[in-house]
Image (cartoon, rainbow, N blue to C red):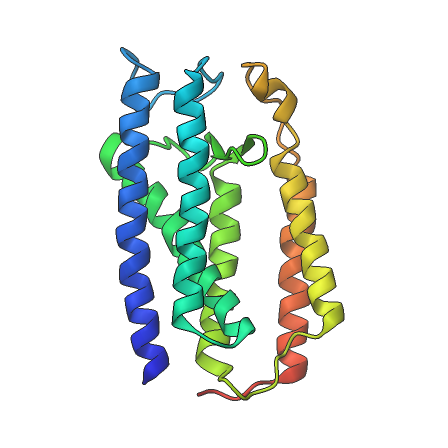
Amino acid sequence: MRTRGLLTWLTVWSIAFGVAEGAVVVYLRRLCYPGEPANGPLFPLRNLDTLLVLTEVAREAATLLMLLGVAMLAERRPLRRFAVFAFAFAGWDIVYYATLWVAIRWPTSLLEWDVLFLIPAPWAAPVLAPVLVSLALLGAAVLVLRRIDETAPSPLRTRDWALLIACGALILWSFFWNVTPIVRMRPPGAYPWWLFLAGWLGGLIVFVRAWRTAAPRRI
């Protein structure tokens, strides 16, 4: 019962936070791309005011701290805290894109390029890539929160965590693949889907194998 209530409020929180994040980007579009269609292409990036860029970096850092704060307050066990963070992050990300589509009909397709983060340098990828990551995180988080309580053994061993971190690094590498043209205000080149899928599918395989081996009980 507690887990059901937790997931319900995490869902509500993620929806609210995603809508707020989407609203901020609608404002930024108006400020940074005046006179252009609201759902026009994001790249090449405009030469933004330094204060605006620094403010955006600070906002992104604050966003991550808020996501972490929710996880720290909601749970005590590290694995469940990580699951709460993953759920909130994934839900926020998906609702963010849904909000932008409702408000300004952007992205026009899941292959539209987006800037994901600016810390420590611009991350960029077609929208489909972060959405796939969020869907995987969402599914894994729900499984952990519903089936791993405060005392149940973790299905993930040290080797599994090492492999998952390696897979995550491959995904991040794909996000940074076009950092040079982006910081030079040029359109990004081809996205390395092969690199992204190696990390994404690899992470899914590691998690599913660990889960099936441990066969945790439902709570």
Residue lying at 68% horizontally and 57% vertically, measured from the top left:
165
Question: With respect to residue 142, does 64 lie above or below?
Answer: above
Would you identify the image quadrant in which residue 60 lies?
A: top left
Residue ranking furthest to the right:
159
Q: In which quarter of the image is the C terminus?
A: bottom left
Question: With respect to residue 89, does 125 lie above or below?
Answer: above
Residue lying at 60% horizontally and 37% vertically, measured from the top left:
175
Q: Measured from the top left, where is residue 128 in percent x and y?
A: 49, 41
Q: Measured from the top left, where is residue 3 in percent x and y?
A: 37, 79
Residue ranking furthest to the left:
103
The one nearer the camera, 147 or 212, is 147
Q: In which quarter of the image is the N terminus?
A: bottom left
Q: In the displayed structure, does residue 69 sit left or right of residue 173?
A: left
Q: In the displayed structure, does residue 122 sit left or right of residue 176?
A: left
Residue lying at 52% horizontally and 89% vertically, measured from the top left:
217
Q: Measured from the top left, where is residue 125 in percent x and y?
A: 54, 34
Would you identify the image quadrant in which residue 70 lies?
A: bottom left
Total count of labels: 0
Q: Can residue 41 be seen in this view?
A: no
The one nearer the camera, 161 or 65, is 65
Q: Measured from the top left, where is residue 30 in percent x and y?
A: 27, 21
Residue lying at 52% horizontally and 59% vertically, measured from the top left:
136
Question: With respect to residue 212, does 50 lie above or below?
Answer: above
Q: Can residue 55 be seen in this view?
A: yes
